[in-house]
Image (cartoon, rainbow, N blue to C red):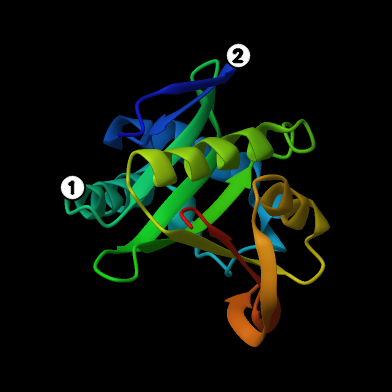
Amino acid sequence: MFEPHQLRNDVSMRLLRVGDAPALAAAYVRNREYLAAWEPVRSDEYFTEEWQAADIAKRLAFHEAGEGFPLALIADDAVIGRFTLAGIVRGPFQSAGLGYWIDSKYAGRGLASAAVKVIVEKSRDELGLHRMEASTLLHNVGSQRVLLKAGFRKIGMAPKYLHIAGKWQDHNLYQVILHD
């Protein structure tokens, strides 16, 4: 599942590999200031190849257990985005959560929208999931557009939902129903 997928001529999406740690660390360093407003406060260690390699290995173990898919957007051997389908729950729930970011140089070009649409389709058709959820900061209009284009619908607002940029922040909650 989630075989490499060509999003554009020069951009593909595939499972992360432990060997991607240098490219992923470089992407985080390159985007450190850009992502700071949208992510938890990160220690300096987070931006190292070693930390990223250990994190990728952990996420690949979740993948092997059927609990998630750590995906990367790749352009010219560089990681330009990360998409994570996580917390897959089977049984009567058949649901997962989606998180993502894209390199500041590539933002606004429709790549995140294209990637999320592929993830939604594969989650429905290949994983057999019933629903997917995602959340955005209230002021993250770009990410909200990405979700709406992929069929997500806003289902509410969660006060002080996640600790982002050093403080507990409200988030809009979204879901897409994949099967009627």
Q: Nearer the viewer, residue 15 or 75?
A: 15
Q: Residue at x 82, y 58 (%)?
A: 141
Query: What is the number of the mark on residue 123?
Result: none
Q: Position of residue 39 (x, y in %)?
A: 61, 64
Residue 101 point in image, percent of width and height? 61, 48
Q: Is residue 52 above or below residue 44?
A: above
Lower position in the chain sequence, tag 2 or tag 1: 2
| Residue lying at 68% horizontally and 63% vertically, measured from the top left | 153
For this view, does 2 lie left or right of residue 132? left
Numbered label attached to residue 64: 1
Question: How many tags in the picture?
Answer: 2
Residue farthest to the top, as pictured? 9
Q: Which residue is mark 2?
A: 10
Residue 57 x %, y %: 24, 47
Discs 2, 1 touching: Cβ within 8 Å: no
Q: Residue at x 72, y 63 (%)?
A: 37
Identify the element where label 2 is drawn: loop
User: What separation in Å lies between label 2 and label 1 (alpha carbons)?
Assistant: 28 Å
